[in-house]
Amino acid sequence: MYIKRERYLNKIRPFYEVDLIKVLTGVRRSGKSVLLTQIEEELLSQGIKEEQIIKINFEDVAFEKIRTVNRLDTHIKKAIKTKDKYYIFLDEIQHVRNFERVLSSLRATVNCSIFVTGSNSKLLSGKLATLLVGRCIEFRIMPFSFQEAYEFNILLGKDIMPDTFIYDYMSWGGLPLRYSFDREKDILAYLRQTYEGIVDKDIVTEKSKISRQNFTKVAGYVMANAGKYFSGKNIETYFESENKELLDKKTVYRYLDKMEKACLINRVKRFDIAGKKTMAYVEKQYAVDTGFRIVNTNQVDFEDTFFLENIIYNELISRGYEVYVGKTYKGEVDFVVIEGRRKCFVQVTYLLSGEETIRREFDAFKPIKDAAPKYVLSLDRADFSRDGIAHINIVDFLLGDKDISLN
């Protein structure tokens, strides 16, 4: 049983017949393989024959012997029997060394449309980018959004309400398979197993020469502090205060890069609002799924705004926006949301529990002279909009009942 991931299908659909390699990247277990199946089903419904579809999942032991360039190329070309267009699905392509050579060859010699997935955010960098520059397009696939998770639970027959389900989503995230479990200890066991599997397969490998013990320390700190300002100095101070082994900044940032490549975190840059430009350095890190935060911290503080910030950030990038941390000359705005030349500014908080909190959140926009729309998002049901700044309930925003606008 699964829901149709229309948000992503709507983005990919215009490229089904286009001569570009469709690259779907995202963390393991986020639903990339199911999305490939949904694309295949749509093609079949349009009259494409099953014989025109070639599927290979490189995590299936049945295909273990074709993880080389020559064997993969031979396997695919043997499956092509006619001059019709073929649709080639290659799941978890990173298991094939130098896979970019096969993709380049197929594009040049075969009438085909190619779809590939990979659990590495840098799949389109390096050799692949060089060989296939201008010949591929990337789609970043996230775990279930709040709306997808809610709709999936309704499909499962669960009696839930959005305003209470948000707390479940904050705690356990949106990895699709976690909804196979009802007991919290089973969900936690699944999340922990998934997280450890990602670390073992994509980060702490024999070739990486990374200390698992040290990586665990850094990853735990990053996940526990997702959404907070990050610097090498901060983590040095933390390890000193905990009387733990010190790690040099170079090692710390190497670990962060590994976490980003494994799609465990997204790293967010600063946007200078006054100067209207993107800064080069990273300000914050957000977990790709809040379930991975609980694996590393074993607790959830619902009043910790950073959990909600994390959810809003993931929602915004899954909608296709560019998102930055906003800096003013007096402070910060949680997010600068950009699409093309349009933008808006967003503050996120748990509850507007008093006049002091209301002033703090709304006054964050005071230094901004830009006329772009400004929003405060919280879990409050009452409307606190004021001074031209709109207040939106977070659940309504996540369900698409209310939306932001950019100009």
Image: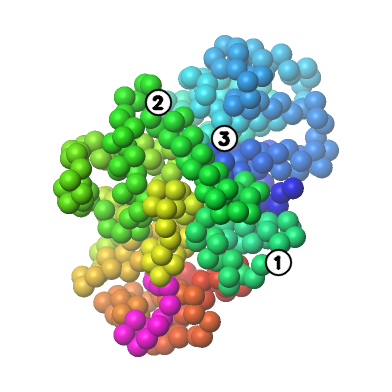
Q: Which residues are magenta?
A: 344-358
Q: Which mark is residue 117?
A: 3
187, 354: nearer the viewer? 187
Query: Is 60 left, or right, of 325 in this rendering?
Result: right
Residue 375 visible to the viewer: no
Mark 3 falls on what kind of element? strand
Residue at mark 2: 205
Residue 69 visible to the viewer: yes
141, 155: nearer the viewer? 155
Q: List x then y, in percent, for residue 350.
A: 42, 73
Q: Earlier in the sequence, mark 2 or mark 3?
A: 3
Residue 135 drawn above or below residue 266: above
- Amino acid carrying label 3: it is Thr
Q: Which mark is residue 48?
A: none
What is the CA distance from the residue labelled 1 to the residue labelled 3?
34 Å
Q: List x then y, in percent, for residue 163.
A: 58, 72
In magenta segment, residue 350: yes
Mark 2 falls on what kind of element? loop
